Amino acid sequence: MKTRKLLMIPGPTPVARSIQDQMGRETVAFGDPAFVKDFKELLEDLKSLLCCSGEVFVVAGTGTMGMEMAIANTTKKGDNILIVSHGFFGDRFIDLCRKKGLNADVISSEWGETVPVEKIREKLREKKYSAITVTHVDTSTGVCAPVADIGRMMKEFPETIYIVDGVCATAGEPENVDAMGIDILFTGSQKAFGVSPGLTMLWASRKAMERRKSLGDIPEFYIDFEKWLPIMKDTGKYFATPAVNLVWALKESVRIIKEEGMENRYERHRKTAAAMQEALEAIGFKILAKEGCRAVTLSNLIYPEGIDDAKFRGLLAEEGIMVAGGLAAYAGKMFRLGHMGNIDKHDMVSVIAAIERALYRAGMPVQLGKGVGIVQQHLMK
Ligand code: PMP
């Protein structure tokens, strides 16, 4: 008999049965009154869950589209933009911004660390920046940026739009658009919301909406706020076909989040990460992200000496767990484990148990049950 495979890459994350059921519903017209109502309620919930008094956009696309949408609606060719990068996905903004003809300055940290807020402040004082980008959790490093501290500092630079990439964070790491002074926050459906890939959710502050207005006509078409705003205000209107079943799936995800409570969900992610990270360190892995800036949504685990990446991940897949490989300089040296969204106690215990079995089969001197015991103790706290 085949072992069931648990999807533990850092997105897509496991999709709960009730969310899958929404994907399997018979598709209706996007003008269907019941769908129009569902979509409207979803948008209201998304605004209140992330405490955004501005606008929210739900558009078919991926996280990368959210990045592009944020830039397209807040900057124009020739503008200065500051990119704060903690890894591969922070760096993705560099190419994206240069393609738009922006003057992109970059401040990067070593992988596993964050750029100090003071360094960002110094850079912002050098010249006028139209916008700054910060990746809340860089999936390549498992580092969590201090978005609230940066937001406080950003009050000194009211002409700069504060863009936060929440793709690997939103609905897992605490975020509050208004209170943190975030102007644009975006994520993809496939991460901590636990929905299949295919939707971009983007929150925009009033300041971001004013910036869009001040830009006049922009070269982008599909990702223009002004094209989508009438639909977000009246979900019965048409600009481009909404992903009907994904919208329902996201609505079910939001129902689950409301039932759990956003604060409880953040706390659960914090506890899950503490349990998983302690267990993984105890069985021989090093966590790339330094203590004090570790994400709760995933762990990036450096192999102990003597482990072959492809072989280990192959064994782990046989043991029933799919994880992701390391990126860039860490390819072959580490693996990435998602623990965000709608995963539960069963998943946590199974994942650590499977990792122990894979280590054992790879010939490592692992004490079977050691990591599992740690997770169990955390679960009983
Ligand atoms: N930003 C971050 C932080 C990400 O983790 C990812 C995807 N892993 C992206 C952007 C890009 O998202 P997508 O693959 O959905 O385009």
Image (cartoon, rainbow, N blue to C red):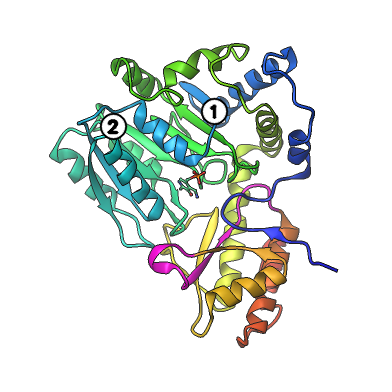
Check the picture and name the quadrant holding the C terminus: bottom right
Compared with residue 61, is residue 33 higher up or lower down, i.e. above or below?
A: above
Circle on res. 155: 2
Residue located at (21% from left, 31% from top): 79
The reply to whether dot 2 and dot 1 touch (C-beta < 8 Å) is no
Evaluate whether residue 377 shows in this view.
no
Residue located at (79% from left, 66% from top): 3
Left or right of 6 on screen, residue 129: left
Check disc 1 and report the residue beneath it.
Answer: 59
Compared with residue 328, is residue 210 higher up or lower down, i.e. above or below?
A: above
Q: Is residue 327 magenta?
A: yes
Furthest residue to the left? 126
Left or right of 341 on screen, residue 181: left
State the SS at label 2.
Answer: loop
Please provide percent x and percent y for residue 111.
Answer: 36, 62
Left or right of 121 on screen, residue 272: right
- Could you tell me the amino acid type at mark 2? Lys
- Could you tell me the amino acid type at mark 1? Val
Please provide percent x and percent y for residue 318.
Answer: 71, 71
Circle on res. 299: none
Evaluate whether residue 155 shows in this view.
yes
Check the picture and name the quadrant holding the N terminus: bottom right
Residue 368: image quadrant is bottom right
Q: Is residue 335 magenta?
A: yes
Mark 2 burial class by Cα count in 10 Å: few <14, some 14-19, many 20+: few
Label 2 or label 1, whichever lies nearer to me, is 1
- Give the spatial CA distance, label 2 vs label 1: 30 Å
Q: How many marks?
A: 2
State the SS at label 1.
Answer: strand
Please provide percent x and percent y for residue 75.
Answer: 29, 28
Residue located at (69% from left, 16% from top): 37
What residue span does the magenta drawing correspond to?
326-343
